[in-house]
Amino acid sequence: MTDLAVKHRNPVRWFVLAALVVLLLLLVGPLLVIAVNAVKSPADYAANGPLSIPGSLYWDGIVDFWNRVNFGQKLWNSFVTALVVAVLGVVLSILNAYALGIGRVKGRVWFLVFFLVANLLPQEVLVYPLYYISKEAGLYDSLFAIIIIFTVIQSAFGTYLLTSVYTEFPRELLDAASVDGAGKWRTLWRVVVPVSGPTLAVLFTFFFIWTWNEFFLPLVFLVSNDNQTVPVALGVLQGDRMMDATTTSASALIGILPAILFFLIFQRTLTRGIAAGAIK
Amino acid sequence: MAGRSSRERGYALYLIPGVLASIAVIVVPLVMTVYVSFTKWTGVGDPRWVGLENYTRLFGDTLFWQSFGNIGLLVFAMAIIPTLLGLVLAAVLFDYVGKKFGDRWAGLFRSGYYLPQVIPVAVTGIIWSWILHPSYGALNRILEAVGLGGLTRNWLGDPDYALYSVMLVMIWFQIGYPVVMFMSGLSRIDPSLYEAADLDGATWWQRFRKITVHMIRPEFYVVLITTTIAALKIFGQVFVLTKGGPSNATLVPSYFAYKNFFEKAQVGYGSAISTVLTVLIVALAFLFLRLQHRSEELR
């Protein structure tokens, strides 16, 4: 490539970069606006509008909102639900996939079709009977019901993904384990689970974030204040009279921060996992 | 063979917890909803069998058609635009930015574009209903500040603009997912293919069409099917942004069903709506899978 060609290309190069930066600002900008206004006093907001940099950091909006909705409780509810669902969902996926992928039980194709369809179902088609049954069973308005439901829903995806991984599981390892006299149960926990560790980590990450972000079923099931998860608490407050501009920003910011925190913590597994062929 | 079949039976035990749980949480509710869709039921007492009445009412209901029409536009905003835009962005980031500026830059842009995806759906709604608020929202303030005061609108409150506003929010939300998927697909491509194309004097656009698009076909199908289904299922954003309004301008089937279940106590009618939605989603998914299968066979 001659010098002339390089020079000729330079404007294009900066133009492309500029376009990408503008797009980045459009995508991240709203989050920055939220962050800026969350720490702005209502007086400052009234005087200078949404785009000014706050004259001083004002934490009262966040603190007030936190106390008013008892946000710590919501965070804890979300955290417990997401964690328990992620753990149980992975375990259930492992058991299913062990039978289908490695055990190749009879009718495995039909089981897989079932889990695929289960994975596609809109929650609207399950919600009313679940609501009705859980009321009858005394599980309405409890995190317990939400945990059971999401464990099953997430594991439908997990079973589907993990079975395709286990179908290709190296047979030599299984044979070696059985030569050593290990039964199926031992083989599963001592050989299969450790070897598939990275995939399981990805599943765990997905289940955790998906459950954390779920809105529809928690909205229906968790009606009392003490049981709400973060998205439900924030969602139902929309349009509430106490929600002025800075309070809204404050509430959005404390809803975003945990999500970004998980994003940073899980980023490596997440990027790898999205690539693993998520069909959700 | 006797040994093998006993071995199989041993493995089948591992399916028991999963199958029992799925029956309780998925199969039984699904069957109940389909049954209830043939009845009149307020959620209290016994459902009364009415045959196809809910369905005939449904197909004559303008709200039903409107909600499915809105979903068509949302598929455009959540699946088609992000997939096409994501394809170009991923190719530019991978093949241009990555090579001219370094992979770190490409990675930085990718993470930035993906950020809206990790934010809880409900929070997305809160952010945008504030930005688009007619009196104190940031967008109208910005328009006024730059002298475009004439363009200010009640973005979510005006039936003429509400759906388009929701569509823009959904593009914002969705764009990062195809970028990440396609970039990971591109990393599979053998660099020598690009080098050979360069030697042959291919332009960037030719390489994009002949190599990039061709090679990431599997990801292309996965992205298209997953985003389309996500659009058909959309609930949270609509609930938080507009509650289906104003005057049903942004009504979607899932919210339509929700209203019938929990606000109007018309459980039979709500069940019919969600049954139709489910049939549509499952049918579309299998159509996509067949198309994908066929395109793989053709290769």
Image (cartoon, coloured by chain):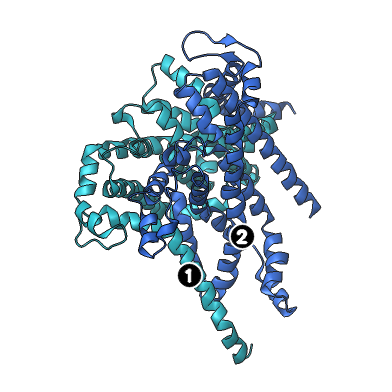
Q: Distance between the residues labelled 2 and 1?
A: 18 Å
For the residue carrying disc 1, how many other residues have a C-alpha within 10 Å: few (<14), some (14-19), or many (20+)? some
The residue closer to the viewer here, B213 or B142, is B142
Horizontally, residue B194 falls left or right of residue A275, namely right
Circles 2 and 1 on the same chain = yes
Question: Mark 1 falls within which chain?
Answer: B
Seen as rendered, the residue at the extreme right is B298
* Residue B87 badge: 2
Residue B238 at x, y percent in the picture: 47, 39
Q: Does residue B171 sit above or below B52 in this rendering? A: below
Which image quadrant: the N terminus of chain A?
A: bottom right
Q: Name the residue under label 1.
A: B105
Q: Indicate the quadrant where residue B141 lies.
A: bottom left
> Vertically, is A253 above or below A78?
below
Q: Output the letter for the chain in cyan.
A: A
Q: Identify the residue at image location x=37%, y=36%.
A: A232
The chain coloured blue is B
Q: Where is residue A204 in the image (x, y as percent from the top left)?
A: 46, 43
Mark 1, secondary structure of its residue: helix
Q: In this view, does A166 lie to the left or right of B137?
A: right
Residue at 44%, 55% (x, y): give it. B115
Mark 2 vs 1, N-terminal side: 2
User: Residue B62, image x and y in percent?
Assistant: 60, 30
Q: How many numbered discs, if any?
A: 2
Residue A186 seen: no
Kindly identify which numbered label has been placed on residue A31.
none
Name the residue: 52% across, 36% down. B251
Q: Quadrant of residue A16?
A: bottom right
A56 or B73: which is nearer to us? B73
Report the amino acid beneath label 1: Trp
